[in-house]
Amino acid sequence: MNTNSHSHSTHEAAEDIRNRDIRIYVNGDIVHRDEAKVSVYDSGFMLGDGMWEGMRLYNGKWAFFDEHMDRFFNSCKAVSLDVGMTKDEILDALNRTAEANGMTTDVHCRLMCTRGVKDKPFQHPGLSRSGPTIVMILEHSKPVESLQTKGIRLATVPQVRGLPTSQDPKFNSHSKLNCIIACLQAEAAGAEEALMLDPHGFVNTTNACNFFIVRRGEIWTSTGDYCMNGVTRAKVIALCQAEGIPVFQKNFSLYEAYGADEAFLTGSFGAQTPVASIDGKPIGTGDRPMTRRIRELYAELVRENTGGA
């Protein structure tokens, strides 16, 4: 396991002691984190049977809320999981939880919906008869500065993002074991995150974020066939198209990734996180003008979406 003191993950947040006393939404109640509990019979705990969504609060507004809800409800529908709440009801619950915590900006939420408590400890979804479990964890959360200055070290791993006929990687499923195995493999290789290939050997995504490279003024990312359906990924692609930056969703190999001028990851938490190296090979010269430009464009988009100054 990597014991480098400078090691960090793409979800490394600056410590905020206020998070020790946050209040969490659990099935309609907003309670202190020490009192936020679900049953050991819950299908999410027992089987990973559930969907989740990660969102950011800026200036009192949830960034790209509609897009996140589209993904969340589509995922739940695909696995016949009745959320039991409308989009507006979820928004109201999020805002009430934020208010209970005195939160207005630089907040990260993990919204979770499982199939609920099971009558017996077995797999069949019909054993979940009491309705869904809904949990919303909101934390004061800002990425550590070193994510931008140092970048992330990636290692290519044998664990792949599989075919939709096994477990569709577009799901933000509670069943994350595939990605956890990849993360463990990356740490064993001395890296901080895993670069995962698709079933055909093309560069795909990391265990937690979407992956982009910059080559000769162009931005490349995977076809999207085998990667998570990232909201931030989609926003970056749209920004490039609007700004006239050549952007391609295509198959490419590690050869092109190793030889990239820049590489970065996208996700709701870190927005755009630069990649320092892949498999021990430094990416580019360390100067990242395109990544900086994308970060600036994305930050402006967030301000426009949330009404920030």
Image (spheres, rainbow, N blue to C red):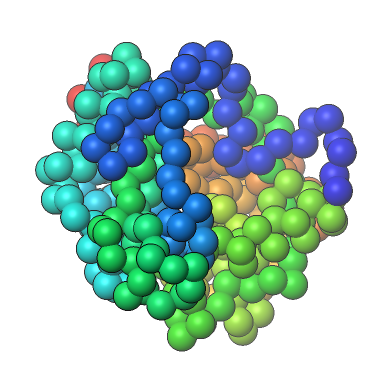
Q: On the rendered structure, is 271 left or right of 188?
A: left
Residue 308 at x, y = what percent? Answer: 26, 21
Above or below for 203 versus 296:
below
The number of discs equals 0
The image quadrant of residue 185 is bottom right
Residue 84 at x, y = what percent? Answer: 19, 55
Q: Is residue 200 visible?
A: yes
* Residue occupying the far front of the picture: 120
Front residue of this view, candidates 28 and 67: 28
Q: Residue at x 69, y 62 (%)?
A: 182
Front residue of this view, candidates 164 and 203: 164
Q: Residue at x 86, y 48 (%)?
A: 1
Q: On the rendered structure, is 131 left or right of 137?
A: left
The image quadrant of residue 260 is bottom right
Front residue of this view, candidates 117 and 288: 117
Q: Residue at x 34, y 18 (%)?
A: 101
Front residue of this view, candidates 42 and 234: 42
Q: Quadrant of the C terminus?
A: top left
Q: On the rendered structure, is 54 left or right of 149?
A: left
Above or below for 146 versus 104:
below
Q: Is residue 284 visible?
A: no
Residue 105 at x, y = what percent? Answer: 35, 21
Above or below for 124 versus 45:
below
Q: On the rendered structure, is 309 left or right of 136?
A: left
The image quadrant of residue 255 is bottom right
Residue 41 at x, y = what percent? Answer: 46, 57
Q: Residue at x 49, y 26 (%)?
A: 34
